[in-house]
Image (cartoon, helix red, strand yellow):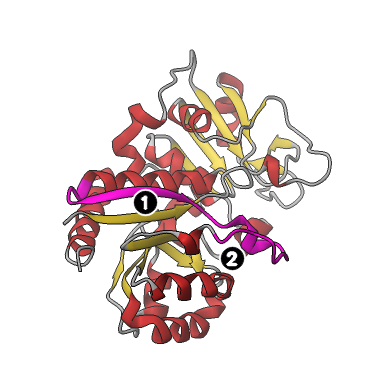
């Protein structure tokens, strides 16, 4: 009997990086488990607003299994608890894949949640080792895995179909500040890059990517030139064209690495305070914090095979 499985994703317009791992999870499930029917389920935006007038779309689903991903492991789970109870009453199982902590200080909350729902959760596949270490004491089957955004490297033609006319250097930061070249490496007030990058900035076209344009309530300020959209395909096509990517956003770096760009992550801005950069360490890119690095694709392939085997043993339960 074919199992009906839903993967819950969304919030692309407010952070396009969410689309990268959503698409990666969806393709991972669809390409590996033939005896399942996979559905992409839009997340419950109303859960994040104070209203009692919203239609409970997720709770109304008729599926065998619903999978959640991204930084959902934390107190944010409380927003879904009524939905979980309604699904469980219909014998729907839950699972988490490509999952990370909302905050690493909330491990006790997550462990309590897992204890309460352990008989209804099939598995957890984390996206970083820190999350795994915090939760490994749970009775729920758990695997230390990688972020499924890295699965997009196997689907470049599908998700990055556009070929641009020239190679690019990509900047993707939370704020657009001035860019200068200096041996004084400090980007708290401006983006000052080491002198070794000076020739790079002169010889290639620099493009700024805004990953959160539609998360702004007031005027949005752009660097020149800037690309933004509420869909991921243009972003991914630009990353595919990049020789270098510089960013303080983890999924900007993931996209750069996926498509072969030399990529550098900046951990000195407010964006890094939540520690989600641990997903970059998980793919053996620890040096990304001090220099531009490339992805070890073979290591990623091994991790994806391990994830396939782990999920395959449990998804049909």
On screen, residue 179 versus residue 168, left or right, reads right
Q: Position of residue 47 (x, y in %)?
A: 62, 63
CB atoms at circles 2 and 1 under 8 Å apart? no
Q: Closer to the camera, 19 or 4? A: 4
Residue range in magenta is 32-56
Q: Position of residue 174 (x, y in %)?
A: 67, 47
On screen, residue 81 versus residue 294, left or right, reads right
Quadrant where the image shows the C terminus: bottom left
Q: Is residue 273 magenta?
A: no
Quadrant where the image shows the N terminus: bottom left
Secondary element under disc 2, as helix, strand or loop, is: helix
The residue depicted at 36 percent of the width and 50 percent of the height is 25
Tell me which label, 2 or 1, sits earlier in the chain.
1
Q: Which residue is mark 1?
A: 148
What is the residue that sits farthest to the top in this orientation? 165
Mark 2 to mark 1: distance in Å?
A: 19 Å
Res 284 visible? no
Q: Closer to the camera, 111 or 290? A: 111
The residue depicted at 40 percent of the width and 76 percent of the height is 89
Name the disc covering residue 164, or none.
none
Q: Closer to the camera, 39 or 12? A: 39
The residue depicted at 36 percent of the width and 48 percent of the height is 39
The image quarter in which residue 147 lies: bottom left
Name the disc covering residue 274, or none.
2
- Mark 2, other Cα within 10 Å: few <14 / some 14–19 / many ≥20: few
Q: Is residue 51 magenta?
A: yes
Q: Position of residue 262 (x, y in %)?
A: 44, 37
């Amino acid at each position: 009997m074919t199992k009906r499985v839903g993967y819950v994703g969304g919030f692309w317009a407010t952070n396009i990086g969410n689309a990268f791992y959503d698409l990666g999870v969806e393709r991972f499930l669809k390409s590996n488990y033939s005896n399942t029917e996979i559905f992409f389920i839009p997340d419950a935006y109303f859960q994040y607003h104070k209203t009692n007038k919203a239609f409970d779309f997720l709770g109304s689903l008729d599926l065998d299994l619903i999978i959640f991903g991204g930084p959902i492991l934390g107190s944010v789970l409380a927003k879904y608890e009524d939905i979980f109870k309604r699904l469980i009453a219909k014998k729907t199982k839950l699972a988490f894949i490509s999952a990370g902590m909302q905050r690493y200080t909330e491990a006790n909350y997550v462990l309590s949640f897992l204890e309460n729902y352990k008989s209804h959760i099939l598995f957890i596949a984390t996206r970083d080792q820190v999350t795994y270490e915090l939760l490994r004491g749970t009775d729920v089957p758990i695997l230390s895995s990688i972020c499924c955004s890295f699965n997009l490297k196997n689907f470049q033609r599908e998700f990055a179909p556009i070929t641009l006319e020239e190679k690019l250097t990509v900047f993707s930061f939370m704020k657009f500040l001035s860019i200068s070249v200096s041996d004084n490496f400090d980007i708290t007030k401006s983006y000052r890059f080491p002198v070794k990058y000076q020739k790079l900035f002169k010889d290639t076209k620099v493009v700024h990517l805004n990953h959160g344009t539609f998360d702004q309530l007031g005027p949005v300020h752009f660097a020149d030139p800037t690309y933004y959209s509420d869909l991921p395909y243009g972003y991914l096509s630009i990353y595919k064209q990049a020789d270098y990517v510089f960013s303080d956003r983890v999924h900007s770096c993931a996209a750069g690495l996926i498509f072969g760009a030399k990529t550098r992550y900046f951990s000195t801005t407010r964006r890094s305070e939540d520690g989600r950069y641990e997903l970059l360490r998980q793919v053996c890119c620890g040096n990304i914090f001090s220099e531009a690095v490339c992805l070890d694709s073979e290591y990623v392939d091994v991790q994806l095979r391990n994830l396939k085997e782990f999920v395959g043993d449990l998804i049909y339960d």
